[in-house]
Image (cartoon, rainbow, N blue to C red):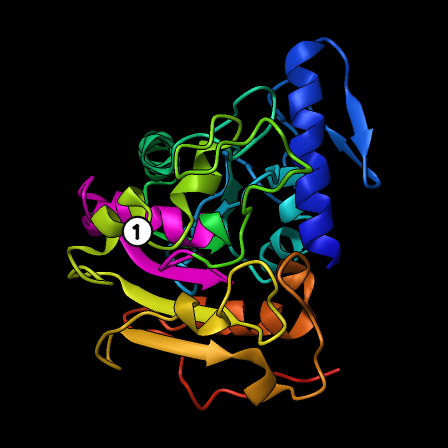
Amino acid sequence: MRVRSTVLALLTAAAAALATPSAAVATAGAEVPTTTPTLSPPGANDWTCRPTAAHPHPVVLVPGTFESMGKNWSTLSPYLKSRGYCVFALDYGVTNGIPATGPVADSARELAPFVDRVLAATGARKVDVVGHSQGGMMPRYYLGPLGGARKVDALVGIAPSNHGTQGLITPTPEVLALQPSYDNALCRACGDQQAGSPFMTELNSIGDTVKGPYYTVISTVYDEVVTPYRSQFLAGSPAQVTNITLQEKCPLDLVEHDQAPNDPAVHQLVAHALGRTGAPADPAYQPRCL
């Protein structure tokens, strides 16, 4: 599978980067960064933006494992900006020059001051958070154990690793630097996202949700990274949680894990969820299928 092959190539490159940290390594058509990525996606991180009555909550975009904000949100960020949202994005968890690979709990501790900065700059009382993969799951640690729930109105997860995965970054002979355990030296976030990991056990020990925020999960049946795809769904009252399978809305949509944030139907579902202040997405909402 393409994404799995890319992940293995990225990790192999990361091992090489440890030996030669001054060089950028190109693999699988992608360049593995050796310095902290700083490029914002189009439309994001305008610190002069002020929320409107129609869109009172700034949107914080949280990328997935191995992803920089500039790459992960190159299409959704301008889409939301063009609809009048104040959009912000961050990089986090950078280890060995590779973004979103640090321990997930530590990454949530990086999200916390970023949310505070957004609130201070915009004057808003709460933010909405949209995350992909790890970025859709990690904010739940911020909401729960770190007490961030009072600062977030909605969390929208695109293919989030909410209960870990049976398929994400299983150690193989191709990646000799990986340890066959949850303690993955090259990518602590990868080990944390394995189903049954100590981190996953801690995260979900308090339940899938906490009081206050509204949750929307958008998943694709063709997800080959966070598997099974239904493990992404959250348990909770319909008044607080909506779980959406993309193909139940658009049966011919073949988008997989990596490209889900760029899918036009996903864009519409995200915007719909964000527009539902004080509620999760309406399960009956129908995006336009291309």
Whether residue 266 is situated above or below residue 52 in the rendered picture: below
Q: Quadrant of residue 182?
A: top left
Region in magenta: 135-164
Give the quarter of the figure containing the N terminus: bottom right
Residue on which the image places disc 1: 140
Residue 17, given in percent of the width and then of the height, sits at: 69, 18
Side of 43 where 154 appears, left or right? left
Q: Is residue 34 visible?
A: no
Q: Residue at x 46, y 78 (%)?
A: 244
Residue for point 60% across, 84% down = 247
Question: Element type at marker 1?
Answer: helix
Q: Is residue 213 magenta?
A: no
Q: Where does the image place residue 155, in percent across and percent down from the top left?
A: 37, 59
Using a 10 Å C-alpha cutoff, classify the residue at mark 1 as few (fewer than 14 neighbours), some (14 to 19) or many (20 or more): many
Q: Would you identify the image quadrant in which residue 44 lies?
A: top right
Q: Nearer the viewer, residue 187 or 246?
A: 187
Kind of residue sitting beneath label 1: Arg
Residue 20 at x, y percent in the picture: 72, 10
Q: Is residue 149 left or right of residue 279?
A: left
Looking at this view, is 75 or 46 the one in front? 75
